[in-house]
Image (cartoon, helix red, strand yellow):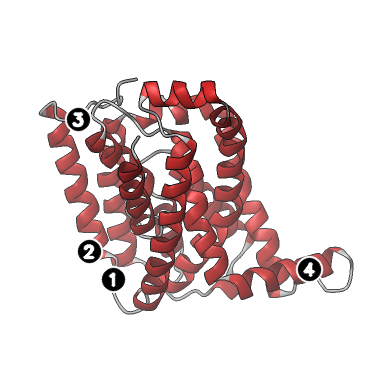
Amino acid sequence: MSILDAIILGIVQGLTEFLPISSSAHLRVVGELLMPGQDPGAAFTAIVQLGTETAVLIYFWKDITRIIGRWCRAVAGKLPHSDPDVRMGWLVILGSIPIGVLGLLFEDQIDHGLRNLYITATMLIVFGIFLGLADRFAPQRKELTQLTVKDGIVFGLAQALALIPGVSRSGGTITAGLAMGYTREAAARYAFLLAVPAVFASGLYKAAQEVPALLSSEGQAAAAAAGEPGLLAIAVATLVAFGIGYVVIVWFMKIISQYSYMPFVLYRVLAGVILLGLLLGGVLDPLGGA
């Protein structure tokens, strides 16, 4: 992977992470177009997501530090567990369990079989339709102060679906939130907060697996020979993703309460159909050369 490829993929990650259109699907497809027959890989995707998730940390810094601080005080017995921020802390922990457990249990399938582009195209279309239905017909009255344990579990299960490229982490959780009656802003806000533990855990886990090998001259040579991303390419893509991602999250949170998700729904369906056409036409390899 060249530095230019890394910059392009970093831009793609930053533009798509917070929109309900699946950043992993876009990295998978754009990576295949940039490097025919070559999948950037699940590890590259997970590590680069650390850049965009750092943007979430900065944007929601006051909320996150307040929730963590009050949660710690409650654990120490200095605040009641019924406190809204304390409850939010517990619900984020609860909602992070499904994706953590399923991510470890099905790591091999996630890294390989589920990256089949036919699956990605299908998920783009199907979950795009689900998002459109939830946005159009759900009541959208509930705020995060009304979040229950049951709703927190549903949010967590919806986030776990994002292990399949094409579903979208934000798209899955936002769709679930809308379907349960939460407002667009509340569903999006919780989706971003819920993603923080999962994305950092996944990215750091993959970094611990990949980075030590890439630090050695043998690992660098092997990555270069296979056309796989090297350490510099990963670092560049992550930094670019952070910068673009921060701009996108600021924009997205400003407009989401005013407009429907229909443009994203139409985009997902159209992207899925085009992807199927590229696959059937032999332009893209569904398995990325695997």
Q: Secondary structure at mark 4?
A: loop
Pick whichever of labels 3 and 1 is earlier in the sequence. Answer: 1
Residue 22 visible in rendering: no
| Residue 115, position as x, y percentages in the image | 36, 31
For badge 2, the amino acid type reads Pro
Q: Quadrant of the N terminus?
A: top left
Mark in front: 3 vs 4: 3
Which residue, given by chain and number where applicable, does mark 2 sit on? Answer: 263
Q: Residue at x 32, y 52 (%)?
A: 12
Which of the labelled discs sits on residue 81, or is there none?
4
Pick whichever of labels 4 and 2 is earlier in the sequence. Answer: 4
Which residue, given by chain and number where applicable, does mark 1 sit on? Answer: 260
Q: Looking at the image, do the residues carrying marks 4 and 1 touch, with CB atoms under 8 Å apart?
A: no
Outermost right residue: 77
Q: Residue at x 44, y 26 (%)?
A: 223
| Residue 257, position as x, y percentages in the image | 37, 77
Q: Disc 3 versus disc 4: distance between alpha carbons?
A: 52 Å
Q: Residue at x 44, y 51 (%)?
A: 169
Vertical relation: 113 (above or below) 169: above
Q: Secondary structure at mark 2?
A: helix
Q: Disc 4 versus disc 2: distance between alpha carbons?
A: 40 Å
For badge 3, the amino acid type reads Leu
Mark in front: 2 vs 3: 3
Q: Looking at the image, do the residues carrying marks 3 and 4 touch, with CB atoms under 8 Å apart?
A: no
Circle 3 residues within 10 Å: few <14, some 14–19, many ≥20: many
Mark in front: 3 vs 1: 3
Mark in front: 4 vs 2: 2
Q: Residue at x 32, y 53 (%)?
A: 21
